[in-house]
Amino acid sequence: MPTIMSAPAVTAVLVDLSRPGRYVHWGFIQISVANLVVIGLMLLVFILAIAIPFPHGGKK
Amino acid sequence: MSRRRFNPDRDVAEWQGPSVRYDLLKEVSVAFAVVLVLAIVFAIVFSSPDERAITLQSWSKAAPVDFVQTAMTELDGTSGTATYGPPYTSTPGASQKLGPLSLESLVGVHIPLDTAQQFVISPLRTLPDVPVLDRAIAEYQSAPAPRKAAWNTAYEKAVAKATFSAGTLEVPGGAYGPVGTMMSHLLDMARTGALDGALTATPQLYGTDYTKPLLFIADGAYMGNVASNRHLLGEQWGMMNETGNYPGQAWLWLYTLWYQVPPMNSSSNGDVEVWGIMMGLTVLLALAPFIPGLRSVPRLTRVYRLIWRRHYRAVET
Amino acid sequence: MSTISDAPMEPAGQVGYRPDTRPTWTGRLRRRAVATLPPEKLLPDSQPSYVASWIYVFGALTLGAFGVVLASGAVLAVKGPDWWHVSSAGLFVNSVHLWGTELFFFFMVIHLWGKFFMAAWRGRRRATWITGVLAFAISIATAFTGYLSQQNFDSEWIGTQAKDGINATGAGAFWNVLDFGQMLLWHVLLLPLVVAVMVGIHVLLVRRRGVVPPFPAKGADR
């Protein structure tokens, strides 16, 4: 949409998530790809938060 | 009071060591700014889902035969809602039990529903004067119970073979008395949207309670089919899903999980069993600091050695 | 009408005036509050040196997300429940509210994992842990009522499904998930208030007891 700075431009959906959902089936487990991504990211961020060294920490 | 023995999962030696500079206000402010930016970016990139609701009108237009078949079950009292048990009806044996205990029955019927009256007959009465309909309702209401039942059964049989074409419901003939007239008027009423209004009408001007239309819609097959296509059914782990490709309430994964495993996935008491389990687990999580074994998990898994690795490196060398 | 005396009123603090030194409720509360949470504990500018990991930022991130959710929710409340369905600006604010909620739970769960693996309940910090778990549980209920208040297919489906679970517990008789008006008011007023109070107590307890020290080091006698 060529409109600049109008409300519709602000809310333009760059990635259309409203198409039919995709699902992963694994035995009796069924999970949407979106939820799987969210849960995967949580685990990843948790691991990174522990693994990545925290900057500064000079004694006071 | 005697001093208890030191338990590493319960007690600590409070810190006497050095401190480092820290800015609480700055941390919270930066955190707020970071989340705000993330939320705005996600909002711009992904937006949010808003799929139009199903109404009695949209349902009866999309699936008129399903609507009439469902309406018939509301009239003859065999629908899911009509036989639900507490809090809607006093249907015997309908309430879920946890062992001998039925919380539903204990609390009782607080939202009493008579589906024949409230979903079918009363809405029809709100239609402006239609002599043929008025006669049909009067005939139906004054008929003795066995005759009503015979009409109902006859119409159920006929409507199972009903079709809908060119704006008209075609129901094979049968000895169903006034029921056919009532049902075709109810369908017309639904298709104009008047039934939605009639079921949310209150003595006040604005109705905000959608219990009746939602229960009516949910009794039909149409809504379930729409949900099934969107992977939202309970047995599809639908509770944690969202329409489209959006993430849903992923934090309900454990609640959803219990519905998939025996005995809950086939139990008629599944809901109350799952709720019992989840309440129990929530209490367990809240009381983790008191529970021997559980409270030792952090010490035994030794993840803490990684979190505080700088501290241990400093004090152990 | 009676005559008004022009004699001056006896001013306080003059000869013969004895100040009332009996304790007041307010004074007691202030002394108690300051003793429990002195300003340097309430608003600290230093931390024990073991507080050196990214895992510590997830509490603040959860608070930040709570702020974003409250702010975007306030805008939605100001404009009323129909606005976001019909206006693109409204849809944008709704999107911020939704993603703020996703981030809120995202950070809160990581915060929970982190605190679990640090056994952060040690040393008289059990109430901190319990209030955190309660805040988590009540947040789930709050988000759930939000999903019910959307007035779209998602909310009507969630409502008609969830009613069976809630009804089975007996709560459905009073807490009707199919009553939009009731759920909306729970969502915008009652539940956020409870979450805010619970989070407030949680944060004050963290400030009072401080961040949990590490498990004893190897070779330490304690």
Image (spheres, coloured by chain):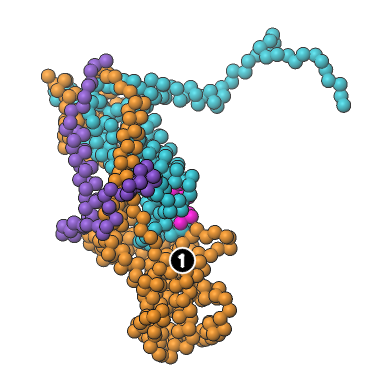
Chain colours: A purple, B orange, C cyan
The single residue placed furthest to the left in the displayed view is B317
Q: Can you say which quadrant of the picture contains the C terminus of chain C?
A: top left
Determine whether the residue tagged by mark 1 lies in a helix, strand or loop. Answer: helix
Magenta portion: prevailing SS class: helix
Instruction: Name which residue lies at 26% across and 39% down.
Output: C110
Residue C95 image position (x, y, % from top left): 35, 47
Is residue C215 shown to the viewer in this render? no
Name the residue located 25 percent from the left edge and 25 percent from the top edge: C51
Identify which residue, C177 or A6, lies in the foreground: A6
Question: Residue B198 placed where, x, y %?
Answer: 51, 68
**Magenta run includes residue B240:** no
B171 over C158 or under it: above or below: below
Return the residue nearer the eye: C97 or C177.
Answer: C97
Q: Residues within 10 Å of mark 1 (few under 14, many from 20)?
A: many
Q: Residue C169 appears in which quarter of the rendering?
A: bottom left
**Could you tell me which chain the residue with mark 1 belongs to?**
B
Q: What amino acid is at disc 1? A: Lys
| C45 to the left or right of B299 | right
Q: Is residue B297 left or right of residue B73?
A: left
Image coords of residue B180 (percent x, y):
45, 84
Q: Nearer the viewer, residue B86 or B78?
A: B78
Lateral position of residue C31 relative to residue C95, left or right: right
Magenta segment: C180-188
